[in-house]
Image (cartoon, rainbow, N blue to C red):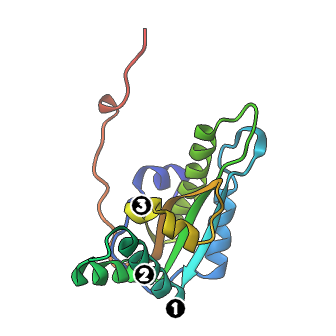
Amino acid sequence: MTALELLQNRVSCPALCGPGPTSEQLHEMYKAAMRAPDHASLRPWRFLEIKGAALERLGELFVKAAKHQDADLPEEQEARLRKMPVRAPMILVAVASIQEHPKVPEFEQLITAGCAAHGVIQAAYAQGLGAMWRTGDMAYDPVVKAGLGLKAHEQVIGFIYLGSALRFREAKPLTEKDFVSEWR
């Protein structure tokens, strides 16, 4: 697969199973993340690896967060939240670690962290793995943030689910005319 084929054909894979990425594959993904465009070389990102029994603990953290919002959380909602993290053999939590800087606003640092996460996903696909970037309410919840050990200047920008793809979706054709115009 050429670099252009990778960039033009990568798709999200919601249906994942084991095995998850090897340590060598993860190393390659992190190397790709570290090439994100980064004004002032702040490196405003980091990743938390969640696998094995920690996936179930993440599900319990999701339940705790939801019960903090609604003490009468329905049982079926609890069950759904517990199952969310075990949809893949591994989750990387992509974290934006924002720093005060006179020339690099928070917005740019969030984009940089997003580019690092994108690098992880692209490198996963290049190695034949499936990946799915998910957010949702739990990504923005203060109980989840505290439970993951994030500091005040950090935020979850996504849960990257990783594993072997049960199937790869076909890339939907898009055309430039829908996204590009000439400014005059």
Q: Report which quarter residue 88 is drawn in.
A: bottom left
Residue located at (66% from left, 65% from top): 30
* Identity of the residue drawn at 29% across and 84% down: 79
Residue type of the residue flagged with mark 3: Thr
Quadrant of the rendered image containing residue 145: bottom right
What's the CA distance linking mark 3 and mark 1?
A: 21 Å
Q: Are marks 2 and 1 in contact (CB under 8 Å)?
A: no
* Residue identified by numbered label 2: 59
Q: Position of residue 1 (x, y in %)?
A: 51, 60
| Dot 2 amino acid type | Gly
Depth check: give the residue in front, 94 or 62: 62
Residues 105 and 176: in front is: 105
Say if mark 3 contacts mark 1, CB within 8 Å.
Answer: no
Q: Quickly name the residue at label 3.
A: 135
Mark 1, other Cα within 10 Å: few <14 / some 14–19 / many ≥20: few
**Element at label 3:** loop
| Alpha carbon distance from label 2 to label 3 | 14 Å
Describe the element under mark 2 as helix, strand or loop. Answer: helix
The first of marks 3 and 1 along the sequence is 1
**Can you give x and y, in whole percent of width and height, for residue 120 in the image?**
57, 62
Neighbours of disc 2 within 10 Å: few (<14), some (14-19), many (20+): many
Q: Residue at x 55, y 70 (%)?
A: 92
Which labelled disc corresponds to residue 165?
Answer: none
- The disc label shown at residue 53, or none: 1
Residue 57: horizontal and vertical position, in percent? 49, 85
In this rendering, the answer to whether 30 lies above or below 73 is: above
> Quarter holding the C terminus?
top left
Q: Amino acid at mark 1?
A: Ala
Left or right placement of residue 17 versus residue 4 in this view = left
- Which of these two is toward me, 93 or 150? 150
Q: Is residue 38 visible?
A: yes
Q: CA distance from mark 2 to mark 1?
A: 10 Å
